[in-house]
Image (cartoon, rainbow, N blue to C red):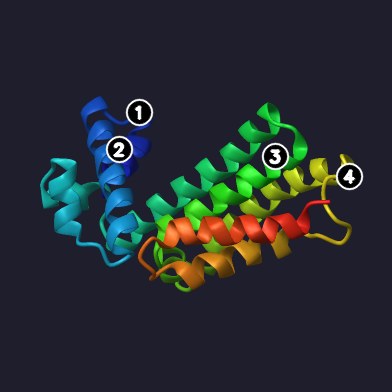
Amino acid sequence: MSPEATAAQAGRPMRADARRNRDRILAAAETAIAEHGAEASLEEIARHAGVGSATLHRHFPSRQSLLEAVFSGRVEALCAKAGELGAQLDPAPALVAWLRAVGTHAAANRGLAASLLGSDPAMGANCHTMIVNAGGELLERARRAHAVREGVAIVDLLKLVSAISLATEQEPGGAAEADHLLALAINGVLS
């Protein structure tokens, strides 16, 4: 049983050292996945986190549970970024900045979404809904400001970002190429 589950069953928060270990494991996993994809070595993740393999497996009993935690955290951060950008920028620049963040998110996933969402459709549906809702709010603000063309839907924009990310995923400098292509596409969306 994981430390989180044990603490939750006992009605108490996780110990500070356990929380730090979990956070270090997640940070190391994010980096490893961005570099090596969803098949990144668990042993390397543990080593980079400064913990033993047993500690990693205490927090994340399976590769799937670790990947789910990384992906969920990234989706939550992406959705929070939509709110931050909406509060800080005018509607069109907020939407553009967030779509670029979606592109960065997709580039960092390197097969993570595909490996997870096929095995857990409910998680995929929940993450998709969160992203569509976050982006939809930004698009609606841009629409009210007459900053986007008529007929543009958030799912269209997300598919566009996803397609660009997939097309450049295996290229050297793929993230930069994806950002360049996204900039070209966005110019066709803005009014």
Q: For the residue marked with disc 2, what is the amino acid?
A: Asp
Residue tagged 4: 146
Q: Residues within 10 Å of mark 1 (few under 14, many from 20)?
A: few
Q: Are marks 3 and 4 in contact (CB under 8 Å)?
A: no
Q: For the residue marked with disc 4, what is the amino acid?
A: His
- At horizontal 75% and vertical 33% (from top left) the residue drawn is 90
Q: CA distance from mark 3 to mark 1?
A: 43 Å
Residue tagged 1: 12
Residue tagged 2: 23
Q: Quadrant of residue 62?
A: bottom left
Does residue 35 appear to the left or right of 132 in the view shown? left
Judged by depth in the image, the label closer to the viewer, 2 or 1, is 2
Foreground residue among 143 and 173: 173
> The residue tagged with tag 4: helix, strand or loop?
loop
Does residue 19 appear to the left or right of 173 in the view shown? left
Where is residue 6 shown, x and y percent of the image? 29, 40
Q: Is residue 158 visible from the viewing direction of this image?
A: yes
Q: Residues within 10 Å of mark 4 (few under 14, many from 20)?
A: some
